[in-house]
Image (cartoon, helix red, strand yellow):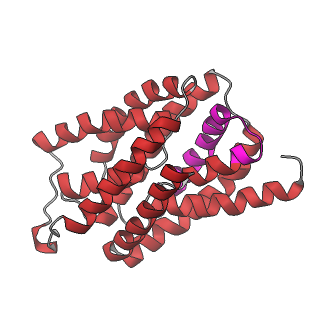
Amino acid sequence: MEEWYHYLLLIVVGFAVGFINTVAGGGSLISLAVLIFFGVPPSIANGTNRVAVAIQSVLGVAGFKSKGVSTFPFNIYLGISAMLGSIVGANIAVEVSGETFNRILAVVMMVVLLIIIFKPKLKTEDIHERITGKYLWIGIIAFFFFGIYGGFINAGLGFIVILFLHYANHMTLVRANATKVAVVLIYTLAALAVFIYYDKIIWEIGLVLAIGNGSGAWVASRVSVAKGDGFIKKFLMLMIVVMAVKLWFF
């Protein structure tokens, strides 16, 4: 980061990333690529990016709550499970490259896209949330594994989380999104602690990026509630295609 305008660019990039991450997912692939382009080592870029994701998640949760959308305490249960997984994933991340996993994720993204296209739509009158009993326990188990990946690199997890909550728990996309943001906040704080322990964060860069991420998340949370499920579905499909191509070819 040799020039002053690099920091301005980080804020702009952060805004786009915060918006994308909050509405769908995959935005961290952009911020990670930018940080590495600026010469930040990959493992440190991964840790530094968590500062921005944490701030982004705080403002995203606040934005949804300001619109009256909250899934407490369901989001807390899932968040704690994901937090435990993220500690495992973050410890792996400080040692292992994510290149191979990115290609696997590209395939996963295309599978997710096919699910969106061909899965029968849940009619509004059929959406009765399933967030207690066995469905709660299924979510807790699933989110432990989601947390491992989230702690490892985080990028792209939002797609899978939203669809899981929509189809497994019968949440509307808006409420699934609000749940996702809260869960990401919880497990990101745990992963951030691991990166801090291993001294894998450049705070100056992370906080500048966080200005953009936080702003983007605040706007996105309020826009997604106002626009509804149709907006989120279209945005989700677009970002899945873009991220899958990026992961596979670049």
Q: Which residues are magenta?
A: 35-64
Task: Say above or below: 220 vs 159.
Answer: below
Nearer the observer, 31 or 211: 31
Percent of width and height locating residue 200: 67, 29
- 204 left or right of 162 in image: right
Percent of width and height locating residue 95: 57, 22
- 149 left or right of 27 in image: left
Residue 176 drawn in magenta: no
- Residue at position x 11%, y 73% in the image: 125
Task: Say above or below: 178 vs 226.
Answer: above
Residue 57 drawn in magenta: yes
Percent of width and height locating residue 15: 63, 62
**What is the chief secondary structure element of the magenta stretch?**
helix
- Residue at position x 43%, y 31% in the image: 86
Nearer the observer, 106 or 47: 106
Q: Is residue 169 visible?
A: no
Task: Say above or below: 172 vs 2.
Answer: below
Q: Is residue 138 visible?
A: yes
Nearer the observer, 193 or 100: 100
- Residue at position x 62%, y 21% in the image: 197
Nearer the observer, 222 or 234: 234
- Residue at position x 23%, y 41% in the image: 139
Percent of width and height locating residue 102: 47, 42
Residue at the far right in the pictured view:
3
- 175 left or right of 150 in image: left
